Image (spheres, coloured by chain):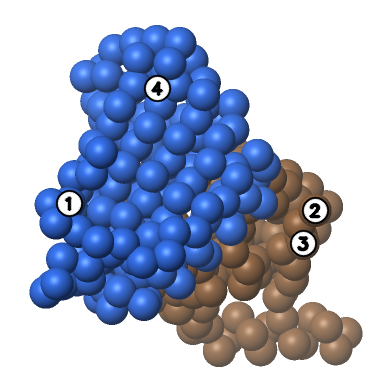
Chain colours: A brown, B blue
Amino acid sequence: MSDAVPILKIGTTLLVSIQVDLQDDTALQLQEDVAERITRTGARGVIIDISGLEIVDSFIGRMLASVAAVSRVLDARTVVVGMRPAVAITMVELGLSLGGVRTALDVERGLALLAPEHESAEDVLLAAAEREAR
Amino acid sequence: MTTAPVATATATERLEVRADSDVVRVRQLVRAVAQKARLSLVDQTKLVTAASELARNTLVYGGGGDVEVELVTDGRRSGVRAVFSDEGPGIADLDLALTDGWTSGSGLGLGLSGSRRLVEQFSIDTAPGAGTRVEIATWSR
């Protein structure tokens, strides 16, 4: 038995923050959950925060690439953020390149990447807050 | 038997690998021993990642098995040795299995070849029908 990874919605972006040591079946479940949430909410972007992950092995790497690919087909863009330096070094040596997956250093930069041009992360958050208030 | 000459081991810890959750347990055990061995953060991360790949191989391709992890020392340096054993079908063509991108299953084909690059010592003992035994070790600098 494993805990599901929570998916938060901020405006038109889904925020997936992985804070547990992912076991394989949880990773597979997450893939399905993200796809389902994109179609249900019409989200245009997905941010996967992996700052809590101590390792990214080939299975987790494949899951990240697969979430990005499925999101793209569902008209949403994915940014993986928060990778630890030791994880990045190890992943490259392992042979994982995460080709096709956009990355950013942290959630804020990830939000900025997903925002339409000339819109800062702050604008995105403000717009989301305004939508919530309405 | 061992790839680390004149290495002596302290207490060996053994874990069974029968389910996804066991792979996580192996990662946690290897991490704990790597910290005791005072490996650098990058070396710890490489070793734990290799252990994760190999434990998953034990589970998926070997049909389950066990992992032994021990803190070792050669008098000057400390290190971590881990042995992954299964009684599965074994590997018929080892050169092929150690090639990047080749997989007999649905994986990426990086488990064996990639994990070999992540550790200091790597040896594998396998034959068709005779199971597979992979031994890895990384030493403090």
Front-lying residue, A54 or B1: B1
Q: Which residue is drawn at 85% across and 88% down?
A: A133
| Position of residue A39 measured from the top left corner of the image (x, y, whole percent) | 77, 48
Q: Are marks 2 and 1 in contact (CB under 8 Å)?
A: no
Q: Say which element carries label 2.
A: loop
Which residue, given by chain and number where applicable, does mark 2 sit on?
Answer: A1
Q: Which chain is mark 4 on?
A: B
- The residue type indicated by label 3 comes to Asp
Q: Say which element carries label 4.
A: loop
Q: Do the residues labelled 1 and 3 touch (CB within 8 Å)?
A: no
How many neighbours does mark 1 have within 10 angstroms: few (below 14), some (14-19), or many (20 or more)? some
Closer to the camera: disc 1 or disc 3? 1
Give whichever of discs 1 and 4 has the lower sequence position: 1
| Residue B28 makes an appearance in the image | yes
| Position of residue B17 measured from the top left corner of the image (x, y, whole percent) | 59, 42
| Position of residue B104 measured from the top left corner of the image (x, y, whole percent) | 44, 18
Q: Say which element carries label 3.
A: loop
Which residue, given by chain and number where applicable, does mark 1 sit on?
Answer: B4
| Residue A76 makes an appearance in the image | no
Q: Residue furthest right?
A: A134
As displayed, is residue B73 above or below residue A61? below
Front-lying residue, A26 or A115: A26
Q: Locate residue A53 relative to residue A34 in the image: left or right.
A: left
| Position of residue A15 measured from the top left corner of the image (x, y, whole percent) | 65, 69
Front-lying residue, B110 or A110: B110
Q: Which mark is residue B103?
A: 4
CA–CA distance in space, label 1 to label 4: 29 Å
- The residue type indicated by label 2 comes to Met
Q: Which chain is mark 2 on?
A: A
CA–CA distance in space, label 2 to label 4: 28 Å
